[in-house]
Image (cartoon, rainbow, N blue to C red):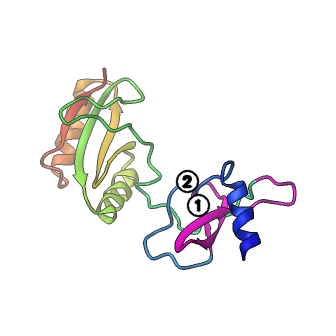
């Protein structure tokens, strides 16, 4: 066990951590992150660490299916977080429709599934306990306003337009 601890410590300077932490309560000995890289659970000094598995050539073992499949809204393109009231840093020019802010991932997933099935292009903006969903970009104000009217009628009464800068 001491030898394993020394190997883990020796590699700590170059070791990678999972792209995201395993879900709370994850007790399996192996975790594959969303990037497909394999990590083994180890206990060191009473702490649980995730040691990256290396292949025979010493390179990280990646390319495996993730242990946890991302949710539908996790797979949406991300917009960097912005301050309250500030226009988000949209990646493309145009007009966007802010649909709502969701604290439950399942709700954001249901909204994303429904609106993608209708042909809307969606984006997400993540905050510590919220996920904001946007549709767009729309090329002009008339098209964006029509989408807003349609979506307000489908259960998004507070949807509003945001112009990219």
Q: Is residue 85 left or right of residue 25?
A: left
Q: Most extreme residue toward the top, as rendered? A: 165
Q: Position of residue 163 (x, y in %)?
A: 26, 25
Q: Position of residue 124 (x, y in %)?
A: 36, 45
> Which image quadrant for residue 106?
bottom left
Does 91 appear in magenta?
no
> Which image quadrant for residue 91?
top left
Q: Are marks 2 and 1 in contact (CB under 8 Å)?
A: yes
The magenta region covers 30-59
Name the element at disc 1.
Answer: loop
Answer above or below: position of 94 versus 29. Answer: above
Q: Residues within 10 Å of mark 2 (few under 14, many from 20)?
A: few
Q: Residues within 10 Å of mark 1 (few under 14, many from 20)?
A: many
Q: Could you tell me which residue is drawn at 12 percent across and 49 percent down?
A: 157
Q: What residue is shown with label 2?
A: 19
Which of marks 1 and 2 precedes in the sequence?
A: 2
Name the element at disc 2.
Answer: loop
The quadrant the N terminus occupies is bottom right
Q: What residue is shown with label 1?
A: 33
Q: Could you tell me which residue is drawn at 36 percent across and 54 percent down?
A: 112
Visible in this render: residue 62? no
């Amino acid at each position: 066990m001491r030898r394993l601890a020394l190997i883990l410590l020796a590699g700590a300077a170059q070791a990678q951590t999972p792209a995201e932490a395993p879900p709370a309560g994850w007790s399996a000995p192996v975790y594959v992150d969303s990037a497909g890289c394999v990590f083994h659970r180890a206990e060191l000094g009473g702490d649980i660490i995730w040691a990256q598995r290396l292949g025979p050539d010493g390179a990280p073992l990646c390319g495996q299916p993730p242990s946890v499949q991302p949710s539908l809204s996790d797979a949406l393109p991300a917009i960097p977080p912005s301050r309250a009231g500030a226009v988000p840093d949209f990646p493309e020019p145009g007009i966007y429709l802010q649909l709502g802010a969701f604290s439950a991932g399942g709700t954001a997933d249901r909204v994303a599934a429904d609106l993608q099935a209708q042909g809307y292009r969606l984006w997400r903006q993540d905050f510590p306990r919220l996920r904001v969903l946007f549709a767009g970009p729309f090329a002009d104000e008339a098209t964006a306003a029509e989408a807003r009217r349609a979506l307000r009628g489908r259960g998004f009464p507070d949807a509003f337009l945001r112009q990219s800068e």
